[in-house]
Amino acid sequence: MKQLITILFIGLISFGVNAQAKIEFKAETIDYGTIEKGADGVRTFEFTNTGDEPLIISNVKSSCGCTVPSKPKDPIMPGETGEIIVKYDTNRVNPIRKTITVMSNAKTPTVALKIKGLVIDPSKVSLLDKKEKSVMEQ
């Protein structure tokens, strides 16, 4: 009888170890392309919990203060989808190369998402453009 109870107990423990949440992103990189200063900087990373346990996103952080990510508040049940929303400050005229780190209870507990692109200011003309324009006028 003790052996039967021991075998059942070990079986339950091993079943619990195998049950896990799994996070699968539709895309792990979002390319903003070339956008103008002040444009909408909000983008969404969509994901699905492909595991068999509820997925809990414990923390989402960015590599700098110009990018603000937000995570789902509630657990994502198996088979359900969720979103990580990222807002980049498009008032910064520069190339975009940022990493958003997602931490969860998934089989892969840390996932690095990336955003990239270029923010331009159409009201400013580069020195190269000015030089080309003056050469053409001559």
Image: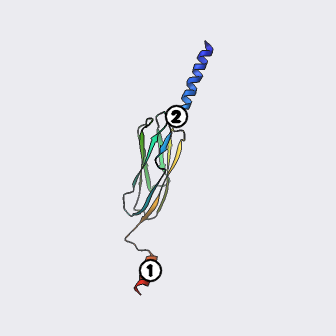
Residue sitting at x 41%, y 81%: 133
Q: Position of residue 93 (x, y in %)?
A: 43, 65
Residue placed furthest toward the right: 3
Q: Position of residue 21 (x, y in %)?
A: 50, 36
Residue sitting at x 49%, y 43%: 24
Tell me, yes or no, whether the two marked residues, 1 and 2, touch with CB atoms within 8 Å. Answer: no
Q: Amino acid at mark 2?
A: Gln
Among numbered discs 1 and 2, the one appearing first in the sequence: 2
Q: Is residue 55 above or below residue 90?
A: above
Q: Amino acid at mark 1?
A: Glu
What kind of element bears circle 1?
A: helix
Q: Mark 1 and mark 2: span between their CA atoms?
A: 60 Å
Circle 2 crowding by C-alpha within 10 Å: few under 14, some 14–19, many from 20: some
Position of the N terminus by quadrant: top right
Residue sitting at x 43%, y 61%: 33
Q: Is residue 86 above or below residue 106?
A: below
Camera-side residue: 77 or 104?
Answer: 77
Position of the C terminus by quadrant: bottom left
Q: Is residue 5 left or right of residue 104?
A: right
Q: Position of residue 110 (x, y in %)?
A: 53, 44
Name the residue carrying label 2.
20
Circle 1 crowding by C-alpha within 10 Å: few under 14, some 14–19, many from 20: few
Residue placed furthest toward the top: 1
Camera-side residue: 5 or 63?
Answer: 5
Name the residue carrying label 1.
132
What kind of element bears circle 2?
A: loop
- Check residue 41 in the rendering and tell me which mark sits there, or answer none: none
Residue placed furthest toward the bottom: 138
Q: Position of residue 95 (x, y in %)?
A: 47, 63
Q: Is residue 15 above or below residue 6?
A: below
Q: Is residue 4 left or right of residue 75?
A: right
